[in-house]
Amino acid sequence: MPERALPQVLILVALFLLALLPRLYSAQTQGWGWDGPGSFTLVNFDEAGSCRAALDGFSYSSLVGWQTISIASALGMPPPEGVRGKPELVKAYCHSAGHIMVARSWSAVLGALTVVALAVLCLQLFPSQPAVAWTAASLLAVSGFHISQSHSGTVDAASTFFIYLFLAALATSLRRGRAAGLVLCLPLLAFAVWAKYWVFAFAAALSVLPVKAWQVLGGGCGPGRFLAPVLLLCVWLATVCNTAYQPWGIGWLLVAYYLLLPWRRLARGTALLWAALPLLLWCFAQLELVQAYTAGSLHSRFGAGYGAIAENKWLRNLLNLPLLLVLALGIPASLFIPAGLRAMLADRDNARVWLCLLPVAVFLLYMAFLAPVTYYRHYLPLVPAAALFAAMGLYATPWARRPWFLVLFLLWPALLAWDMVSDYHRDPRQALRAWFAGHPGARVFHTYYVNPPAGSGAVLFRPEYAAGAAQPLRRAEYLLLSENWYDTAFANELNGPRVDQLDRLIKTRPQYARFYRQAIAGQHPYLAPEHTWRLQHFMPELLLHRAFYGNFQLFVGDIILLRVRE
């Protein structure tokens, strides 16, 4: 090992440990001991979906599932004989405490390795600015949102790791000018596609194209010259993939697209390609698989499908992006992202930067205009890139020369992470155990995500029980509502800020939304609010999010107790 590389390796190891400790701690403590020593309560029902897919018990990506099953088997916890293809038995194994512990720990390790991959990527893109790499990686290491996703046994952190491992390997190959290295990057790209975020990963395949090919496509123009036409094309495609518009979209957007292209600079073959691009995209958008990832369906088993949001999709998607980045990195770091983007745009000659960050740009446009499913965790692949731009922006300004501000720059997101991740360790469902202990034999209805203690006798609630004379509801004494279930009736990351049209709300029905709003407001004739177990926060990002969108976490939220009255 070269002597000058040793300090960098030591810093990378330190960053890995800094990232691993909080992720691994939460992974191995969340949900344990709620109902007594050694008990385990599953909080996130999306966990281990990849394991279930690997055992043919669920339709999902299976790469991470094969990995966690292999690790669990090596530790003496293999799947029982004969479970493959039997969904209930598969689910029982994959959601078992032993496998969930493995899945969460593996996710925590890959989440911590993503911090290392980001640092290596930055070192290859900006070798003369190692401070950018260390700052960006530190920012990601203390990101509460990234920690929250990394301690969960889902595939989001793993997929993000494979994406940035591919980008780091690609940047290394481009810097050293080795064509063979690009070929070796392809298996990493396959892993990224297989894990989950195939939209991001397929966009990454564009990065393998040689620089000369991009120069021919652009007719020698800089990327900025195509910014307006590409944005217009994205907006037009968004209208094609929105249930509120005609199948061919809004025509004048295409006219503006054609008018803004630099036709005189383009070769004949390239000009034909740009001219045919809208037609090719339209044909691609008609595929059923593509429609599922762009328009979404109008109906689901929970009520309205993701496509029912219609024209409200514009405001929701465009608002979710800045909201998520502010909550992932904190206000101070987020303020420097525009400066980082300007610094990158000014560096037109660094082809490595443009090629490696091209997938980030494509995925950002997808989430901003096309994505029908906008759970916050789906934005996770953008967070490392946002940390990179924030660090670039910081060192492009005089603020980087002020030590006190560097401390604030990293301390703020660390405090935000403490406030955010504490939700999992102060889960209101733990306090709910004491209430059940004080009300033995109480007749209780509950919604999903309340997770009542085993043996409590609580029964799953349906809003139909409260309709009309509410005879089924009136057979109970109490109703427990979880915010993670009733939030579909209010503004959140799926509905966006506009919630006046009840038929535009996602994963619910108008009558359900009406019921939850009445019950929580104390306006239902048979229900009286009695107590609320709330999440407590002190950071402004989380307080503001709560005021307008409810609590930030997906599987941890307030619990409301309502008394059934005559």
Image (tube, rainbow, N blue to C red):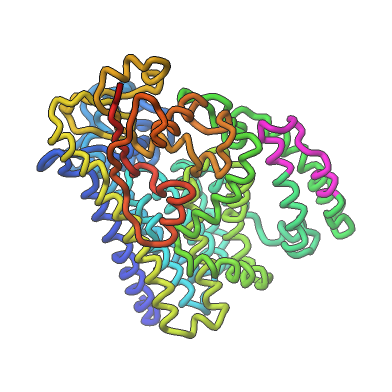
Expressed as whole percent of the image width and height from the top left, the position of residue 514 reads: 48, 29
Total tally of numbered discs in the picture:
0
Q: Going 41% across and 82% down the picture, which residue do you hit?
A: 404
Q: Is residue 154 magenta?
A: no
Task: Locate the C terminus by quadrant.
Answer: top left
Residue 527 visible, this orientation: yes
- Which of 182/426 is in front? 426
Residue 192 visible, this orientation: no
Q: Is residue 237 magenta?
A: yes
Task: Locate the N terminus by quadrant.
Answer: bottom left
Which quadrant of the figure has residue 527? top left
The answer to whether residue 388 is left or right of residue 443 is right
Q: Going 54% across and 68% down the picture, which residue do you hit?
A: 335
The answer to whether residue 142 is left or right of residue 230 is left
- Which of 130/312 is in front? 312
Which quadrant of the figure has residue 397? bottom right
Which quadrant of the figure has residue 145? bottom left
The answer to whether residue 415 is left or right of residue 198 is left
Expressed as whole percent of the image width and height from the top left, the position of residue 138 reads: 39, 68
Question: Which residue is at the far right?
Answer: 264
- Which of 312/268 is in front? 312
Expressed as whole percent of the image width and height from the top left, the position of residue 255 reads: 85, 45
Expressed as whole percent of the image width and height from the top left, the position of residue 355 reads: 61, 60
- Tell me: residue 536, above or below residue 45: below
> Which region shows up in magenta?
236-258
- Which of 132/409 is in front? 409
Q: Going 62% across and 39% down the picture, which residue do you hit?
A: 312
Question: Which residue is at the far left?
Answer: 37
Q: Going 49% across and 54% down the picture, which residue do you hit?
A: 324
- Tell me: residue 344, above or below residue 131: above
- Tell me: residue 205, above or below residue 53: below
